[in-house]
Image (cartoon, coloured by chain):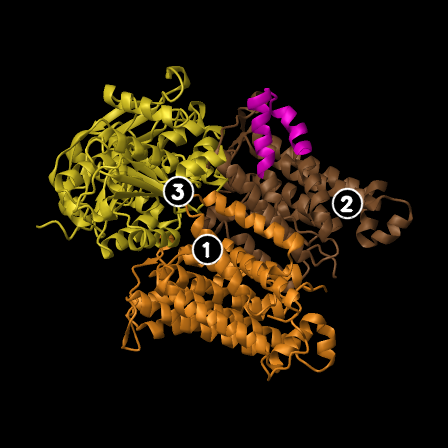
Chain colours: A orange, B yellow, C brown
Amino acid sequence: MATVKEYAGAAPAAVASAVPRHQIVAFLAMLGILLVAPFFVYPVFLMKALCFALFACAFNLLIGYVGLLSFGHAAFLGSAGYVSAHAAKVWGLPPEAAILLGTAAAAVLGLVIGALAIRSRGIYFANITLAFAQMVFFSSIQAKFTGGEDGIQAVPRGTLLGVLDLRQPYTMYFVVLAIFLGGFLVVYRAIHSPFGQVLKAIRESEPRAISLGYRAEHYKLLAFVLSATLSGLAGGTKALVFQLASLTDVHWTMSGEVVLMTLLGGLGTVFGPVVGAFIMITLEHSLAQIGSWLTIVQGAIFVVCVLTFRRGVVGELARILRKPL
Amino acid sequence: MIILRILVLGVALLLATGPAQAQISDGVVKIGIMNDQSGTYADLAGPGSVVAARMAVEDYGAARKGLKVEIVVADHQNKPDVGSSIARQWFDADKVDVIIDVPTSSVVLAVNQIAREKNKALIVSTGATSDLTGAACSPNAIHWTYDTWSLANGTGSAIVKTGGETWFFLTADYKFGHDLERDTEAVVVKNGGKVLGKVRHPFPTADFSSFLLQAQASKAKIIGLANAGADTTNAIKQGAEFGIVRGGQQFAGLLVFLTDVHSLGLEKAQGLLLTESFYWDLNDQTRAFSKRFAERHRGAMPTMAQAGVYSAVLHYLKSVEALKSDDGPKVIAKMKELPTDDPVFGKGRVRPDGRKIHPVYLFEVKKPSESKGPWDYYKVRATIPAEQAFRPMDQGGCPLVKK
Amino acid sequence: MATQALFGQLLIGLINGAFYAMLSLGLSVIFGLLNIINFAHGAQYMMGAFVAYFLLSLTGLGYWWSLLLAPIVVGLFGIALERTMLKRLYHLDHLYGLLLTFGLALIIQGVFRNEFGSSGLPYAIPAQLTGGYNLGFMFLPAYRAWVVVFSLGVCLATWWVIERTKLGSYLRAATENPTLVRAFGINVPRMITLTYGFGVGLAGLAGVLAAPIYQVNPLMGADLIIVVFAVVVIGGMGSIMGSIVTGFALGVVEGFTKVFYPEASNTVIFVIMALVLLVRPTGLFGRAS
């Protein structure tokens, strides 16, 4: 069974413990930019981009390092958003509890869907995840608490840990930044741990990994649940940022959008999904006047990426620098 | 053509360069038209609403009066998350003073929340939910053109009174569809009619044949369409195919616009009953306005949503001038205070709960033989006077209304 | 629910199934030979309807001409796509084909939406097929009867060509082992191109059939594609008969869902897909890989 082969070529030799220097430099550069950005750029825009960056990183864990294309990741983003929004608005939980609850819901959903889907591969895996995501979408329309197409609106941002008033845009921004960095580092750690090495081995050749004594199914499921959980973290945070949880986030086109972000940034690169998400959100922002142009540009990016640019922005950069990013 | 459209949309319209007035924030009255520029509701509001807003600015003579007015446009794609992030950005960063139009109830409710939070103004023309003057009413918002209650009331009561007492609903399985169905059913029952059945179809649905068979089997005289856009036109189109109208049943569209009838064609749409608050061929004033509009909008006559934007912008500017300020809630209060008068709706007023009132009409779509030409589609079946056309203030539960 | 009414719903289900069958047949043929999931199928179906509309409004050519010409136009468009883009992807994982055609679908739909708006354009039922038959349990519009008969004919003809003729045997052989077939002096790349054109042409043909029933609308294929996609997967990717049978069967299942649980009628196919894939990972008629 073929898997996605044209990833950016993260050096398999990268040893788990030592973080290469250029990656530290890249990380610090990203951190620096994100720390000063809100003072120059509209913070809500940045927060949106950060949420999607985390979502794309979580998705990349699956496609980039396990070679599984999920076409139903919106289910995790969206359902976590609903749970967090409901917890904050109706149950009056503080934001940290609301986000955690949403994340936990996505984890459970990920476990259920993952356990059922993980046996299939390639196109069939994409389809079965899509099927489950459609069911989640359907439940979101039918369930009372999700508010149908109105979604859950006017979700209070609340006070984090009883001290930080999240209604202040800068406070909210730095909390979102912290959540993003936390998620990003978890993904980084997972990829560069022995666990990540096994995942890569499975991606390259599942039978070989099995014959080496690894229980491939277990590893894949674990990666799937981790990916779903982090997607949920992104979704729960997003619901608080926008004070809204809506059907958009569970619709199948959202699953397509995260594929696009990851592909554009670079499948299987550490920083690619982040770059991809920022580019896409910027595009969406600048094309806000006409929705149909947005689809055309998105489509064109897909086509160009697949035809000539399969490594994505960061992947190409890594190739030029000859260093994995 | 595409490039032209980008230019038209993208370049904000700057009118005149009169002296900046101290009370107008940053010297410019900035109007944000937010609607669906490319999706299902693009034809009934979309770019046409922008044309209408521009006409209002020109007709008002903002330039002559030294008022600097700027119009910006955004596409919310009918998604509440997109709409709310545009609204935030407009209010926070782009200094927009008022958001106008906003179709799709879910987006309206989200934007309404934000306008209130940021203390800005919102005037809704295309958005339908009557919650805007009910539980969600706000000192920052006015609901201008029509609402779900007035549609349900106009269509429901007038039809039952003229003999359509048994109903079957085809309802979009969405909160908006449920609300429309619930409101209409209440009116039908109150007027002595009966609901024989209903079916809730997913949104969107392309094929209605199965639902139409169920409606046929019910033998109800009226098939109420509690849906919108492509769902409604598909249901009507396929209804013609399955001989619904020939079989003695009649469609009642609960949210049908002139552009929907135009895209269906009279052959398919004839006999359809619907409620609107504006039609281009009502009187000399509406005809004159609509003719000017059509010249600027590829020959299409204005829908009630687009005409409503014109009327709303006109009254907004009048109130800004009277107040000499563009402060959100103050202008809204002024708008409620001043009587309205425009070629679209004639004389009217805005109630304390934020409901603009004017007469509403029950129309029947003409037979092809009755139509004298393109866009000659409706005949008036009943006129509901302004005071009865909208939900009485004490029934909405709006906290702004003192008991 | 009376038995008579159920007959009506069964028939309606078959008619809708005819569209699923034709569309999934095209997808299946393409996947079988090219190993590409043609996500642009919905957009190409929409193009078929638009071509019919333009033939009528610009040149005055009516429905019957459209039935012949629109699939050719759309098919040629498909051939152009295959020659310029898709052929570069054959050596890659088929996920890339899916992503490319997904992008193409977005572009096509966006362009049409930009140019023609979204409320749809009218297209009338041809004069010869107006009216209908009273079957006692229901009124069957003549046009619907035509749709089911015609598409069944097209489906069976396609099946016959692929499974029973020499040309079909080349095709099937090329699916299994292109190098070997090429060694026999058969121009495999051209065969691939023509197959893609044919599959896309089928989508265009379905679009023409749909034009008089639905609004000719830029988004008419946008959500349909994932449903048809599901039909193909349930039937087994690449299985010709599988997609025909599954198409009709799922039309019927969906039809009955519309009676008993209408809210779920858009979702039922995905539930079935999940169940089928859990029990038979390669679909009902699929060969084990």
Q: Residue A69: image x %, image y %?
A: 61, 62
- On whether disc 2 and disc 1 are found on a single subunit, the reply is no
Amino acid, disc 3: Asp
Could you say whether the residue bearing mark 1 is in a helix, strand or loop? Answer: helix
Q: Residue B201: image x %, image y %?
A: 43, 45
The residue to which callout 3 is attached is B36
What separation in Å lies between label 2 and label 3 (alpha carbons)?
Answer: 41 Å
Answer whether labels 2 and 3 touch (C-beta < 8 Å). Answer: no
Answer whether labels 2 and 1 touch (C-beta < 8 Å). Answer: no
Question: Crowdedness of circle 1 by 10 Å Cα count: few (<14), some, many (20+)?
Answer: some
Could you say whether the residue bearing mark 3 is in a helix, strand or loop? Answer: loop
What separation in Å lies between label 3 and label 1 (alpha carbons)?
Answer: 20 Å
User: Is residue C47 found inside the magenta-colored segment of the image?
Assistant: yes
Would residue C7 be visible to someone looking at this image?
no
Residue C192: which disc?
2
Chain that bears disc 1:
A
Q: Which residue is drawn at 44% across and 50% down?
A: A286
What separation in Å lies between label 2 and label 1 (alpha carbons)?
Answer: 39 Å
- On whether disc 2 and disc 3 are found on a single subunit, the reply is no
Could you say whether the residue bearing mark 2 is in a helix, strand or loop? Answer: helix
Is B339 situated above or below A13? above
Residue A282: which disc?
1
Relative horizontal placement of residue C87, taking residue A265 as reference (left or right): right
Amino acid, disc 2: Ile
**What residue range appears in magenta?**
C46-73
- On whether disc 3 and disc 1 are found on a single subunit, the reply is no
